[in-house]
Image: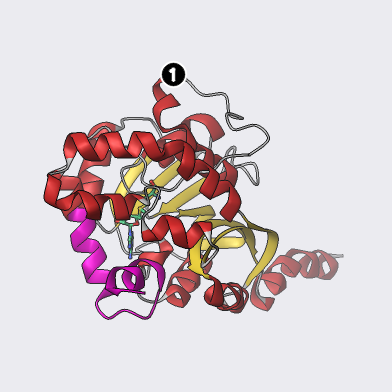
């Protein structure tokens, strides 16, 4: 793997990973502010029914990226839940989840100030908020959300175990963590281990590499057109690489399963302390009698 492969695909192995990604996303968001892209993931296709979701016309252009959000976030009912999204990017996923899946509120967090500025300007929906924040040091109080969503962002983090611990801290007991991202095949077991060590139980665990690759094939033409229209020629190879257009090393790594795309629905295990607190009213009732 070359330097860029290591940076993109190998969490924890690359020095200054966090700083490089922050610079990259800030640069992208400010330089290409006018590009109509609202989502930045590789997409998801149900191969038996590639257009399975009913979408409004305004969401059609980014259907496959939205389908990834739907696949991850719709694993449980989010209706009425206070929800956090970490790594919200340009906010298209957060906007979809708020409009279609009806959480009571959705707060999107990203460490790129330019992304957050873009989101605040673009979406004005009641109950949809955007804040600057770092996945490895979230600014929220303990037990403050019912659900946390994280889509194709964790490969940028310096320490995924810190991120998982932070998600566990901000979730209420029994709250849900809905998570997807790619990992080198030899790092899959370590990711699973870290999730369990952070205090989650697995509700659903899937390998969706084939579904993501199918979306990449369907998305190829759209990506090439955007890159050719918007990106100066000398940077086109880098943009293609980042977008994982067909034939790029990222696309090949997923196609040949050097990288695996994982998707989880997890639940925060209540601690013994939480369980003791739940017992307390009953103890008082007995004492009252
Ligand atoms: C590939 S984009 C995905 C964005 C969005 N989830 C989507 O699917 O459109 C990864 C996002 O993670 C954000 N990110 C990376 N590291 C982060 C960190 N430590 N804290 C918060 N956000 C981070 C980046 O700024 C970027 O917006």
Q: Nearer the viewer, residue 276 or 237?
A: 237
In the picture provided, is 200 more to the left or to the right than 133? Answer: right
In the rendered image, the residue lying farthest to the front is 247
On the rendering, which quadrant does ligand 1 occupy? bottom left
In the picture provided, is 225 more to the left or to the right than 64? Answer: left
Q: Is residue 210 above or below residue 202?
A: above
Q: Position of residue 182 (x, y in %)?
A: 49, 62
Q: Residue 225 appears in which quarter of the rendering?
A: top left
User: Looking at the rendering, in which quadrant would you find the C terminus?
Assistant: bottom right
Q: Residue 92 appears in which quarter of the rendering?
A: top left
Q: Is residue 112 above or below residue 187?
A: above
Which residues fall within the magenta stretch?
1-26
**What secondary structure is marked by label 1?**
helix
Instruction: Reply yes or no: does residue 3 show up in magenta.
Output: yes
Query: Residue sitting at 74 percent across and 64 percent down?
Result: 281
Q: Position of residue 192 (x, y in %)?
A: 60, 73
In the picture provided, is 192 more to the left or to the right than 10? Answer: right
Q: Position of residue 24 (x, y in %)?
A: 21, 59
Query: Residue sitting at 82 percent across and 70 percent down?
Result: 287
Query: Residue sitting at 79 percent across and 70 percent down?
Result: 283
User: Looking at the rendering, in which quadrant would you find the N terminus?
Assistant: bottom left
**Which residue has dot 1 on it?**
57
Q: Is residue 179 above or below residue 136?
A: above
Q: Nearer the viewer, residue 221 or 173?
A: 221
Q: Position of residue 29 (x, y in %)?
A: 20, 47
Q: Nearer the viewer, residue 61 or 114?
A: 61
């Amino acid at each position: 793997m070359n330097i860029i492969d290591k940076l993109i695909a190998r969490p924890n192995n690359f020095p200054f990973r966090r700083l490089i990604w922050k610079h990259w996303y800030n640069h992208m968001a400010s330089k290409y502010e006018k590009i109509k892209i609202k989502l930045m993931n590789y997409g998801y296709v149900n191969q038996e029914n590639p257009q399975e979701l009913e979408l409004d016309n305004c969401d059609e252009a980014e259907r496959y990226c939205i389908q990834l959000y739907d696949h991850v976030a719709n694993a449980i009912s989010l209706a009425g839940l206070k929800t956090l999204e970490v790594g919200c990017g340009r906010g298209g996923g957060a906007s979809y989840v708020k409009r279609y899946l009806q959480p009571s509120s959705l707060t999107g967090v990203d460490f790129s100030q330019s992304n957050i500025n873009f989101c605040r300007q673009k979406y004005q929906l009641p109950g949809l908020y955007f804040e600057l924040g770092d996945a490895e040091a979230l600014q929220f109080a303990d037990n403050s959300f019912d659900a946390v969503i994280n889509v194709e962002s964790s490969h940028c983090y310096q320490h995924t175990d810190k991120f998982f611990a932070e998600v566990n801290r901000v979730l209420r007991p029994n709250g849900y963590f809905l998570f997807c991202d790619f990992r080198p095949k030899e790092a899959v077991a370590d990711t699973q281990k870290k999730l369990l060590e952070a205090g989650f139980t697995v509700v659903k665990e899937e390998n969706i590499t084939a579904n993501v690759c199918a979306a990449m094939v369907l998305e190829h033409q759209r990506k090439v057109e955007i890159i050719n229209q918007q990106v100066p020629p000398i940077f086109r190879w880098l943009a293609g690489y980042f977008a994982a257009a067909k034939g790029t090393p990222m696309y090949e790594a997923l196609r040949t399963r050097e990288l695996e795309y994982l998707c989880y629905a997890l639940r925060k295990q209540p601690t013994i302390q939480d369980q003791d607190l739940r017992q307390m009213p009953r103890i008082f009732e007995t004492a009252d009698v």
